[in-house]
Amino acid sequence: MHWLAAVERLRRERRAGVLVTLVSVRGHAPREAGAKMVVTATEAWDSIGGGNLEATAVARARTMLADGVAVPEQISLSLNDKARAEHGQQCCGGEVAILLEPLAVAPSVAIFGMGHVGLELARILARHDVELHLVDSRADQVAAGRLAALDDAVARVHVHHAPVPELVLGQVPRGTHVLVMTHDHAEDAALCDTALRCGHLASIGLIGSSAKWSRFRQRLAAEGHSPAELERITTPIGLPDLTGKDPATIAVSVAADLVRVFEAERVPVRAHDRQGAST
């Protein structure tokens, strides 16, 4: 499989990997600068030249994946008979530099309710590398014309017209952050009930006032949810010090809080101090 197709496959399947690039070549080497491959914990696609060169890069990429390294690394290898080699000798005579770039799994967000706030929030999140699920029970709210502002999105946008929106909760990826903000409080309550019964969601956020949440708590408790389970729902959502109630301000507040969560989830492991290893 070509490396570019492999990158697309990993993104589609929400799997982590490492993009390995031969960034420079001095002297002779099996491949020219620019050759690429993709490595996962168990698979590898395309090639940067085989032999000790490639095996060393694959081993380092898999160590990065196992350690959760989230920043690129560069290593250098000498290809001669005097160089130490762990995976067989390569006597091409050159020296190469290899860049290893982690391919992280993009965060996933599902917005239930594409009203004024939902649309403003989608516009902001669409500028980020996320899997963005937009859900509404009303067909006109997710019509192509209404969502035209998202046509150039960086995010991967998945549109769901769902007369029973709770069903979409079972379709979103593991680790999805769910935001409940529909036009109908009964629909919101049903979504909260179903979301609490899902074990694969990262977080559940509910838009609304303290009075709304007080009613919801009673209703959800009557459905059998314990106080500890109800703590999974965050309400109100967004940054507490942004108090504006217009849709654009609420959307900025919620998006900023989410981006902060995304950064915390990544918890990047710093690259090793060494820039390369001569072998």
Image (spheres, rainbow, N blue to C red):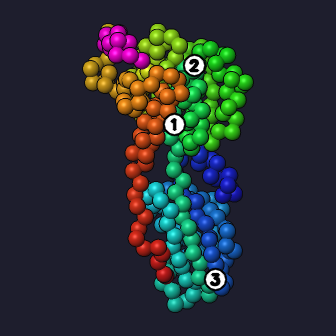
Magenta-span inclusion, residue 19: no
User: Under tag 1, what secondary structure?
Assistant: strand
Q: Residue at x 38, y 16 (%)?
A: 209
The local crowd at label 2, few if under 14, some if 14 to 19, many if 20 or more residues have their Cα within 10 Å, is some
**Where does label 3 land, which residue?**
26
Residue 220's spot in the image, x, y percent? 35, 13
Please provide percent x and percent y for residue 181: 49, 20
Q: Would you identify the image quadrant in which residue 162 lies? A: top right
Disc 3 secondary structure class: strand
Q: Is residue 156 above or below residue 82?
A: above
Residue at numbered disc 1: 108
Magenta span? 208-221
Q: Name the spot of residue 39 as percent of width and height, x first.
A: 56, 59
Image quarter hosting the N terminus: bottom right
Q: Which residue occupies the extreme left position in the image? A: 227
Q: Work out whether 7 lies above or below 185.
A: below
Q: For marks 2 and 1, give the CA distance.
A: 20 Å
Please say if the residues under marks 3 and 2 sit with CB atoms less than 8 Å apart.
no
Q: Dot 1, crowdedness within 10 Å: few (<14), some or many (≥20)?
A: many
Q: Amino acid at mark 2?
A: Gly
Q: Amino acid at mark 3?
A: Arg
Mark earlier in primary sequence (2, 1): 1
Q: Which residue is mark 2?
A: 115
| Spatial CA span between label 3 and label 2 | 58 Å
- Bin the neighbour count of mark 3 within 10 Å (Cα to Cα): few under 14, some 14-19, many 20 and up: few
* Residue in front for this viewpoint, 221 or 55: 221
Residue occupying the point 48% across, 81% down: 278
Observer-side mark, 3 or 2, equals: 2
Three-letter amino acid code of the residue under disc 1: Ser
